[in-house]
Image (cartoon, grey):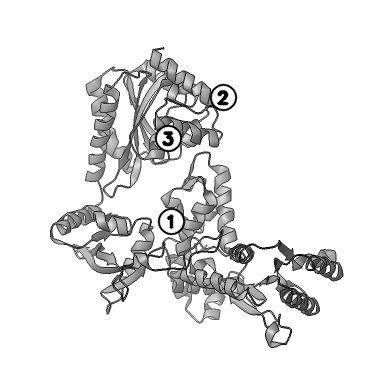
């Protein structure tokens, strides 16, 4: 090894022994720390095999003639080309050097194997995808020992709208001084990217042409958008920073469907207000998208919406939906001087909100959570005695879960105990379902405040933030978030969290992809995002089908619609008719 190679090898060994690297390149040192956090094996590299992919995918079709041509021109230069998708799965491998191909086979660097950083450690494929830019990894900079004999350069490949499609990796024998390999990687990736752009659909090319034309004549901040594509001017990109493309498209579609409205004030997922003015864009008579002028909303005083004071989430909670925030803050405000009944569907987060209220109001004293359903096991008398014994101590916050699941006599006793505790300084909350719960002792000062939390289907714009919170520090691919937003969640947030947790147990990388989701979850996702009205309509249809034991004719009769109408609505939602 050269002096430089010895130095890198020494740094790596020191890192594995617990010492911080000193001279290693920053991107490599940070990658090592990520791998250590994810417990990536150092000496036993076993990349996951996922052979089920489209061999005629647009990226493969764009890359194949480029790689064949470059490989033929370079001859036996001792390099190989690996083409991967956005999840680090190898789609194609090309090389004229049979010895190098044999060495790549020995480390499973072949079609179908996944080289994500979270699975095989620091490498030219996974690390470049993590950082979203060109990355070079030489010899002992690789986290796994099996890759120390290689130098790898990975270059991300993006489509017209800058969406990541995959990556080109150029690999050769480990050589810190080989500057040619980086040049070849970047030049070849650029050629593949150009071919990928050229084969975009006619509608996408038309949108790109309209964007270029508009950039010459439109003086305002604007963007061009369709269901699959968003291209924006620099300033518009800043305004839309952090907004999900699917949410923006839904807002624009709603604006375009309103014949009497040409512009609308829109709240982005992070609470910022913007004004959008949209016009449909057509190509050959077909609507292909929209061009939208955008500006920050201004208050009456003239200041922009960015300076508005908006309610924030309670400690530990996630979400910016206005109805959700109003409900949470109403619970916190009323808990200061009343017993509060927090109602809502199962899994909406009633207990989580009650616990957040405790922290929001200062967190003074203990936080006690008691489940009324355990009366069926402990017996009402023992359960009441246990609750009474803790309420004589230092005042804090007490939360009685499932208060609606006990007998009327037991509920009266619990109500009396909570009102008594409130009089002695306790903050008292109870959780219940959607039906009214009689928890009033009769006096004006003993009336409970009831606040309902909205179901998840009424705040789907919060799903991206929720799943990011559930998955941290790992990430979810954009297509996964989009699918989760199109999925019905009868169990609300609890159901959503369970699905994310299940996906995290399957994926071995740092990013969750569609293949990591259970088949039944992918099957029940709607084909498109539905409006709140459409969701309510579909919920009524599903309730009728349940009541009719699956008989569609009987369900249609219960709903007062024709069977063909029921079939059409189910088909539009992407629900099978078998």
At 24% across and 31% down in the image, what residue appears? 187
Label of residue 482 in the image: 1
Residue at point 55%, 48% (across, down): 503
- Callout 1: SS: helix
Callout 2: SS: loop
Helix, strand or loop under label 3:
helix
Q: Is residue 495 above or below residue 325?
A: above
Q: Earlier in the sequence, mark 3 or mark 2?
A: 2
Mark 3 or mark 2, whichever is nearer to me: 2
**Quarter location, residue 27:** top left
Which numbered disc, 3 or 1, marks the residue that appears first in the sequence? 3
In this picture, residue 203 sits left or right of residue 90: left
* Front disc: 2 or 1: 2
**Where residue 46 appears, x then y in whole percent?**
53, 29
Asked whether, in this view, residue 570 is left or right of residue 195, the answer is: right
Question: Which sits in the foreground, 188 or 53?
Answer: 188
**What residue sits 35% from the left and 56% below the top?**
241
Residue 492 spot, x, y in % from top left: 57, 63
* Vertical comparison of 318 with 535: above or below: above
Q: In terms of sequence position, does the residue under pointer 2 or pointer 1 come before the other?
A: 2
- The circle on residue 126 is 3
In front of the other: label 3 or label 1? 3
| The disc label shown at residue 17, or none | 2
């Amino acid at each position: 090894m050269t002096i430089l190679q010895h130095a890198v090898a020494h740094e790596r060994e020191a890192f594995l022994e617990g010492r911080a690297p000193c001279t290693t390149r920053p991107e490599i040192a940070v990658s090592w720390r990520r791998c250590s956090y994810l417990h990536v094996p150092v000496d036993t590299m076993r990349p996951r095999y996922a052979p089920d992919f489209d061999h005629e995918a647009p990226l493969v079709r764009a890359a194949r003639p480029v790689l064949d041509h470059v490989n033929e021109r370079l001859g036996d230069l001792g390099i190989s080309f690996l083409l991967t998708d956005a999840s680090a799965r190898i789609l194609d491998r090309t090389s004229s050097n049979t010895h190098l191909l044999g060495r790549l086979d020995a480390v499973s660097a072949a079609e179908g194997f996944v080289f994500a950083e979270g699975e095989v450690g620091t490498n030219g494929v996974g690390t470049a995808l993590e950082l979203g830019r060109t990355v070079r990894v030489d010899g002992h900079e690789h986290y796994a020992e099996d890759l120390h004999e290689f130098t790898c350069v990975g270059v991300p490949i993006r489509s017209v709208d800058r969406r990541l499609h995959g990556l080109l990796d150029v690999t050769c024998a480990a050589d810190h001084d080989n500057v040619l390999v980086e040049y070849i990687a970047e030049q070849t990736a650029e050629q593949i990217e150009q071919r990928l752009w050229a084969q975009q659909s006619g509608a996408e090319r038309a949108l790109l042409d309209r964007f270029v034309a508009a950039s010459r004549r439109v003086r305002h901040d604007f963007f061009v958008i369709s269901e699959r594509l968003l291209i924006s001017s620099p300033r518009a990109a800043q305004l839309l920073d952090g907004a999900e493309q699917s949410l923006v498209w839904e807002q624009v579609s709603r604006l375009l469907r309103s014949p009497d409205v040409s512009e609308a004030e829109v709240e982005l997922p992070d609470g910022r207000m913007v004004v959008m003015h949209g016009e449909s864009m057509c190509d050959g008579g077909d609507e292909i998208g929209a061009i939208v002028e955008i500006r920050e909303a201004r208050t009456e005083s003239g200041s922009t919406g960015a300076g508005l004071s908006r309610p924030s989430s309670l400690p530990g909670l996630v979400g910016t939906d206005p109805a959700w925030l109003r409900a949470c803050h109403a619970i916190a405000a009323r808990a200061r001087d009343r017993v509060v009944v927090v109602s809502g569907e199962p899994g909406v987060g009633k207990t989580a909100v009650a616990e957040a209220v405790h922290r929001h109001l200062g967190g003074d004293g203990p936080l006690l959570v008691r489940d009324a359903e355990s009366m069926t096991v402990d017996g009402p008398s023992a359960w009441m005695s246990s609750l009474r014994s803790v309420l004589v101590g230092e005042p804090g916050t007490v939360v009685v879960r499932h208060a609606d699941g006990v007998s009327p006599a037991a509920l009266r006793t619990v109500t009396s105990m909570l009102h008594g505790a409130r009089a002695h300084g306790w903050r008292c909350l109870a959780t219940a379902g959607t039906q009214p719960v009689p928890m009033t002792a009769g006096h004006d000062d003993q009336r409970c405040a009831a606040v309902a939390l909205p179901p998840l289907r009424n705040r789907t714009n919060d799903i991206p933030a929720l799943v990011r919170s559930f998955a941290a520090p790992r990430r979810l691919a954009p297509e996964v978030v989009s699918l989760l937003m199109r999925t019905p969640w009868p169990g609300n947030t609890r159901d959503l969290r369970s699905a994310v947790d299940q996906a995290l147990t399957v994926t071995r990388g740092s990013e969750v992809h569609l293949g990591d989701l259970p088949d039944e979850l992918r099957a029940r996702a709607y084909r498109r995002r539905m409006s709140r009205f459409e969701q309510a309509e579909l919920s009524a249809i599903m309730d009728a089908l349940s009541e009719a034991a699956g008989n569609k004719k009987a369900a249609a009769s219960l709903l007062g619609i024709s069977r063909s109408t029921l079939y059409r609505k189910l088909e539009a939602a992407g629900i099978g008719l078998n």
